[in-house]
Amino acid sequence: MAVLVTGGAGYIGSHMVLALTDAGENVVVIDNLTTGFAWAIAPQAKLVKGDIADEALVAEIIAEHKIAAIIHFAGSIVVPDSVSDPLGYYLNNTVKSRALLQAAVKGGVKTFIFSSTAAVYGNPLTMPVFETETPTPISPYGTSKLMTELMLRDSHHAYGLNYIALRYFNVAGADPQGRTGQSTPQATHLIKVACQTALGQRKSMDVFGTDYDTPDGTCLRDYIHVSDLIAAHMDALAHLRKGGESGIFNCGYGKGYSVLEVIKAVEKAFGGRVNHRLAPRRAGDPAAIVAGADRVRSILGWQPKHDDLDFIVQSALAWERHLLRRNAA
């Protein structure tokens, strides 16, 4: 029996593969490597280069490796890009997820964990936002993820596919052992961009929007260390394996930091200035969003270990320095 990780060569997916192989699981990765890196995958895992929309290929993987669980990360994640290319996002995040679900159901897979997003909430009416809040996404990215959540719900009722959808807040940081991290050069994650700017890889960075209804006028986000997020996936897998109920869970710490506060944290870790300029708002960005994360703790037993912005930033900066050395070699 094995676990199939889609998008396992990417940022979060590669951390998932490490956690699974560290735990002694048999792991198969399917990734088309458009944004992922084969070298980021733990050597104990098997990589199949391909697309999750290829139902015949996925069916072959499920049968050959006796896949008992799928953890689904593959997809597009840049909110402003989804606004400019909505049909591309509905194809990559929704249509292809439908193909993956079809292959899973036909192949008899009963356990499915989905990488969802806090973007399904849009501009929430309450803060922190809990899973009981009615989703009102304001970007095609958020809508594309919500549509997959709905397909999972319906597949659970119709076919007995047990699932957990984890709604990520802002994922950042890198493996504390330095084995993987956010490696896409042009990634838009705030902490990565700030670290790259500190190290001189970018001349400057933009702060998108300074007139939001927040303490300093910049967007407020709940940042979660990638290793803590992966721990939630491991808890979700254990929960479903024990016969636990399907459902949706927020993944965040329940506290928010503004863009300018994050920049200051990077300056503190780096020991120097991060050049930045003030820019207009971006389409699709909510003013503030912070997780109500009681449910993931009480039901899945999640216990985060890295709830500290300074630690998140330090691990991200260490990874950027590692990439500089790696790329120079």
Image (cartoon, rainbow, N blue to C red):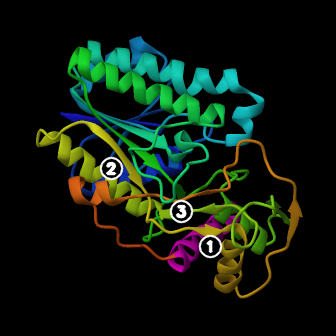
Q: What residue did someone put label 3 on?
A: 222
Residue 20 visible here? no
First in sequence: mark 2 vs mark 1: 2
Q: Indicate which label's residue lies in the foreground, 2 or 3.
A: 3
Nearer to the camera, 225 or 117: 117
Identify which residue is drawn at 23% across, 58% down.
Answer: 298
Nearer to the camera, 149 or 91: 149
Identify which residue is drawn at 41% across, 55% down.
Answer: 251
- Range shown magenta: 309-329
Q: What residue did someone put label 1 on?
A: 317
Q: Indicate which label's residue lies in the foreground, 3 or 1.
A: 3
Q: Residues within 10 Å of mark 2 (few under 14, many from 20)?
A: many
Q: Along the horizontal axis of the image, is 72 left or right of 124?
A: left
User: Is residue 311 within the magenta segment?
Assistant: yes
Note whether 229 is above or below 244 in the view shown.
below
Residue extending farthest front: 125
Q: Position of residue 18 (x, y in %)?
A: 36, 54
Q: Amino acid at mark 1?
A: Leu
Q: Position of residue 115 (x, y in %)?
A: 44, 41
- Distance of label 3 from label 1 (alpha carbons): 19 Å
- Distance of label 2 from label 3 (alpha carbons): 18 Å
Q: Are marks 3 and 1 in contact (CB under 8 Å)?
A: no
Mark 1 element type = helix
First in sequence: mark 3 vs mark 1: 3
Where, by quadrant of the figure, is residue 209 drawn?
A: bottom right
Q: What residue did someone put label 2 on?
A: 233
User: Is residue 94 within the magenta segment?
Assistant: no
The main secondary structure of the magenta stretch is: helix
Q: Residues within 10 Å of mark 1 (few under 14, many from 20)?
A: many
Q: Amino acid at mark 2?
A: His
